Amino acid sequence: MNFAGIFFILAALSPFGASHPVLKIRRALRKGGFSGAIFHRGQRGYDVFRKVENGSCNKILPLLVLRPRNSKDVSIGVKVARRKKVPISYRSGGHSYICQSIKRNSIHFDLRPMNKVQFLGWKSPESSEGYAALGPGSKWERVLEILPPSKFLYLHGQCTDVGVGGYLVGGGSNTVGTTDLLGNGVDHVLTYEMVDAKGNILLVDRQGVRRKGDAAIRRHTNETDLFYALSGTGSSYGIVTEFTYRIFRRPETLPMFVLLIIETDRDIQRIRRMSETEGLHVSLYRFQHFRRLDLTLDNLRNIVFGKAPGILRSLGGHRVDSVAAFIVDRRTMGRFTDKKIVFRALMKHKVRTTIPYRMYENAISMTDFDNYDPNLPNYEYYYHSPRERRKFGAQGVISANRWYIRDRRVFETLIFDDPTFSLYQPTKNIAKRMGCDFCYWVLVFHTSDSPIFFSNTSSAFPVKTNPNVRDVYSFDFSCNYDPRSKIEARECKKAVDYVAARMTKIAAASGEDQAQYYNTPSCHAFVPGRQMFHERYWGSNYDQLLKIKRFWDPKNIFNHCHSVGSTDEDCCVKAE
């Protein structure tokens, strides 16, 4: 039977007629040579493969879901979408905070079948530098299994369920040590293989751009520098189908885990001085559970995380909940951070631990916390049991973060003063009142020799070290909620908007840039003094990024909420 006969049999069995636009697009894809799976609404597999890892996006229905196998498939899909004038969306891991990886009535590319992980070799037999080929659809969990961090050092997502593609094109930060040592993921991408707005398969490196299989190279100019443009702008310029990624011949150093007491700005300054003078990378975490935890044995770790702050607060007579500190010795080349070095530094700088130093040191010596691995698939693992994850699926997420803060009051307004999220506020089951099920914040201490990704400055990014970077912090505050409840979604967003407004007010009054990490974007519209999204993500780099966009994608084929060329600040998905 020929292709046309098969097509009309499928058309008769489908909910569409043979002349329906969906089936015309399917036929065009197959005729063009698309070899991957294709799913339309109502077809088995459509709901499975169109859902992303943000429950807020569950009601967004694309026209078709494509699962390409290679760059050629992606090229065919882009050409058909362009010819048929259908919007394009694309995902790797699908953890987009504002649903930018999926669009209504789009041709949606699910890149997860493109999950290549291959070690390519060392730069030379003696070199500590090597290379790996990574597909955008691979998750970091898979990469870490094939290229184990006990042997290799490289930037990766702490949430191991995150996809390689979105993580790297969004900048690629890791708050537990490796960013402080190596910079960000985009610093270590050597070559992008990608599909552009015309459907061409391109190879992009620092020297220039060439079509795959073609020796001719187009050298970069200020208005065409695609390599520069791909460094932290998401999927604004095309679909990356493979990364050549730099890795190192040494293990990733695991952090030391310590519980600290922070009551005032003086405690923050003590930690900063310790980090700056002792060569230690410090990141602080605070987790708040606002829902009743599932009391099952397989949820024991979350029960401990949820109950421990209150118990330790009562036993120690503290006024605040403890915070979790992950401390990495930046000077070591080994797998583990030496706990003796950490405890000497804590005592020297009078950083307060939840229990006395010696008791803590003895307790730690009897556990494996001196080689604590902070990686988890995603933050839902901190409050949902395995049974609940299967039942509820992906949860909604909303964020308010600031990077490279100089005025400590920007984040101290939350950690010391906020009526809900302050360390002085005991964590209670108040989900009905404020909507969020789980919230966390991360405070990162940057040192003068830290590689910094200043997307929000006038200098070309990424910037490596800056000797003037002292007393600079990054702060990420995010909350999860049940997306099935419009009330909870609305109330949680309201609580986070309130925090964002307070931080913005302080930053605006002190004249600070409101730099924001592109992989944790947010919409908090109409907050007085708030910079527009392009100012927060890219600062004065945006004019050049727009010029490059107009050259490579003049019709804005690759667009989504807060992409280069977008104009809508308040484009985030609303509770429905």
Image: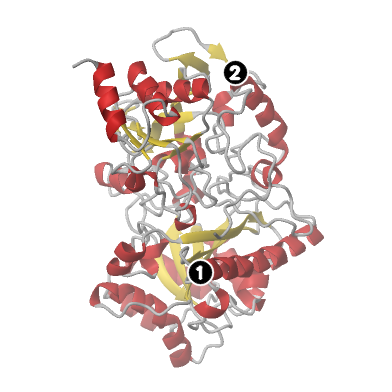
Q: The C terminus lies in which quarter of the figure?
A: bottom right
Mark 1, Cα crowd under 10 Å, few <14 / some 14-19 / many 20+, is many
Name the residue carrying label 1: 439
Eyeballing the image, is 394 above or below 349?
A: above
Mark 2, Cα crowd under 10 Å, few <14 / some 14-19 / many 20+, is some
* Of residues 198 and 457, the one drawn nearer to the viewer in this rendering: 198
Q: Earlier in the sequence, mark 1 or mark 2?
A: 2
The picture places residue 451, in percent across and down from the top left corner, at 55, 45
Is label 2 in a helix, a strand or a loop?
loop
* Of residues 118 and 250, the one drawn nearer to the viewer in this rendering: 118
Amino acid type for the residue under numbered disc 2: His
* Of residues 548 and 452, the one drawn nearer to the viewer in this rendering: 548
Name the residue located 43 percent from the left edge and 59 percent from the top edge.
328
Label drawn at residue 202: none
Residue 492 placement, left or right of 460: left
Eyeballing the image, is 109 above or below 156?
A: above
Name the residue located 47 percent from the left edge and 17 percent from the top edge.
200
Is label 1 in a helix, a strand or a loop?
strand
The picture places residue 431, in percent across and down from the top left corner, at 50, 77
Residue 370: quarter of image: bottom left
Point out the residue furthest to the left here. Answer: 1
Count of numbered labels shown in the rendering: 2
* Of residues 55 and 154, the one drawn nearer to the viewer in this rendering: 55
Name the residue carrying label 2: 220
